[in-house]
Image (cartoon, coloured by chain):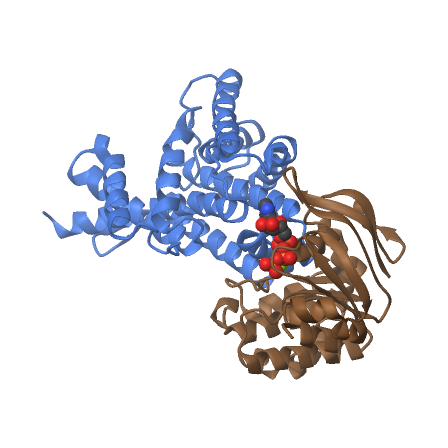
Chain colours: A blue, B brown
Amino acid sequence: MDSTIILQTTLNGLMIGGVYALVAVGLTLIFGVMKIVNFAQGEFVMLGMYVSWALATFVGIGPYPGLLIVAVIMFVGGWLTFKLLIIRIIGKSDEAFILLTLGLSIFLQNITLLAFGADYLTVTTTVKDAAIRFGGLAISLPRLIAFGVALVMVAALTLFLNRTDTGRAMRATAESREVATLLGIDPVSCFAVAFGVGTVMAGIAGVLLTPMFYVYPGVGTLFNTTAFIVVVLGGMGSLTGALVGGLLIGIVEALGGTFVSLDLSQLFAFLIFLAVLFVRPSGLFGRSA
Amino acid sequence: MLDVKAISAGYGDMKVLDCVSLTVESGEAVSLVGSNGAGKTTLLRAISGLVPVWSGSIVFDGQDLGALPAHKLPALGIAHIPQGRGVLTQLTVKDNLLLGGYVPAARERRPETMKMVYDLFPVLREKESQLGGSLSGGQQQMLAIARALMSHPKLLILDEPSLGLAPIMVEAVFEIIKTISGQGVSLLLVEQNLAEALAVSTRAYVLETGRVVLHGASDELANNEHVRTAYLGI
Ligand SMILES: Nc1ncnc2c1ncn2[C@@H]1O[C@H](COP(=O)(O)OP(=O)(O)OP(=O)(O)O)[C@@H](O)[C@H]1O
Ligand SMILES: [Mg+2]
């Protein structure tokens, strides 16, 4: 096997892994603060893609200039979803959350299907086919931008959580809702921010993917599975774990897809997932209970 | 300042507090004693809004607390150090302290308060960037007290601050509590360590199976026959 191909594939996987990490970090934030898994996270990726497509098609704003607009729309959307739906089942059973977010995921897929049909849509950018070349390797510009923006977003989130009062309040709520309350923190508003920010992460990931992926109502399911795997693999609730896990899964999928079979690429993600959990049941960066 | 009027409360349909009344005047130190499972923690949690009150009322500075969500209480000047200390183990010492001054009024004065608290507990300054969970039990109790002070409380509620501490740390904790009380902060102190509790407080209540069975001046209770046999083992 040619080592250039291996390197090139690893690099491609790493770039996409950055986007997986972004989706998973959003999911981890929601899980860490609220202790719920949002099974509609992939649909928020899908919605980010559609918003980006709509901006490009109807307004003429391309994916990258439109990032901020999509971020704002997604935050408002996530916040409203929280205020209208999620808030009703806080303090209820885990099953209630699973049913609600699964229901939401199905609802969002079908409402998109109704609105835009089942067609595979594409978004073009001026950089779509541009690439940076060095030493026999090439990185396509959309992949590099996706990777770079994803990493910047994760870094920004980390700064927000560590350096601001709202971020500290969210970490306090994540550790103990009761202690947070005794400090004057409203856990429910921390939940709302976590859900909103988690949604933004997914939406931004969607935008970053539009130059590389077809946009269609079911595209989110791909990311639901991957993000969930990454979150568990990284160690439920660990942001570092979600980041490393995302990159790892990206690389493994790319290598498996290239050298074994493209159809089986998700299988390799599952295999790595099982292998890691076999050795470290609490995940890569998880705290054993 | 704090007026608990005939409250009943419990978990599910199990009644834990049965018509309990208690007052803490401004600047006063009051202790609440009683054996395991008497309902002391439940009473403190009811005051802080963490346990719903079935009947009766709780008034603080003329305001009915029943109408307020629990997270609004710190802004009124109530700081509650829960049983087990409530240190955020995954946050640094500094972040714990910063969150102690989370309420808006305290946030404005946070840099000065932080300095004051570090002068009072130099060990916390030394360990400010370590995780709360890495501190020893005694240091965690100091952190819990320091964090409560960050909010400039009018009423400080402490639930068994000496629990699980080495004797020398117990002494240090009570020394601090005495200092805080001397600065005019009202105290409501739950303790198993009856002798120490009665020594720092002016009045005390004895709680048995969810009812106040005795209350009065701390020095009188210290000489009370029932208290001496039941709690002091003399
Ligand atoms: N979360 C809970 N759910 C159900 N019952 C509880 C709960 N917390 C306490 N209890 C019960 O309520 C009663 C009073 O408990 P509480 O913790 O208030 O007592 P305490 O006086 O603080 O005791 P200790 O000195 O052991 O801390 C006990 O019978 C206890 O088992
Ligand atoms: Mg107790």
Count of number-bearing discs: 0
In this view, the residue in front, B154 or B208, is B208
Rendering coords of residue B68 (x, y %): 78, 47
On the image, the x and y values in percent for residue A48 come to 50, 35
Query: Which residue of the protein is positioned furthest toward the left in this rendering?
Result: A1
Q: Identify the image quadrant of the C terminus of chain A.
A: bottom left
Residue at 63% across, 48% down:
A187
Q: Residue A52: x percent and y percent?
A: 51, 34
Q: What percent of the width, then of the height, locates residue A183?
A: 67, 59
Looking at the image, can residue B68 be seen? no
Which of B3 and B183 lies nearest the eye of the viewer?
B3
Q: Is residue B55 above or below residue B108?
A: above
Q: Is residue A252 visible?
A: yes
In the image, B177 versus A100, the foreground residue is B177
Q: Residue at x 54, y 42 (%)?
A: A200
Q: Is residue B163 left or right of residue A24?
A: right
- Image: A273 above or below B183: above
Q: Give the residue at x 76% y 75%.
A: B223
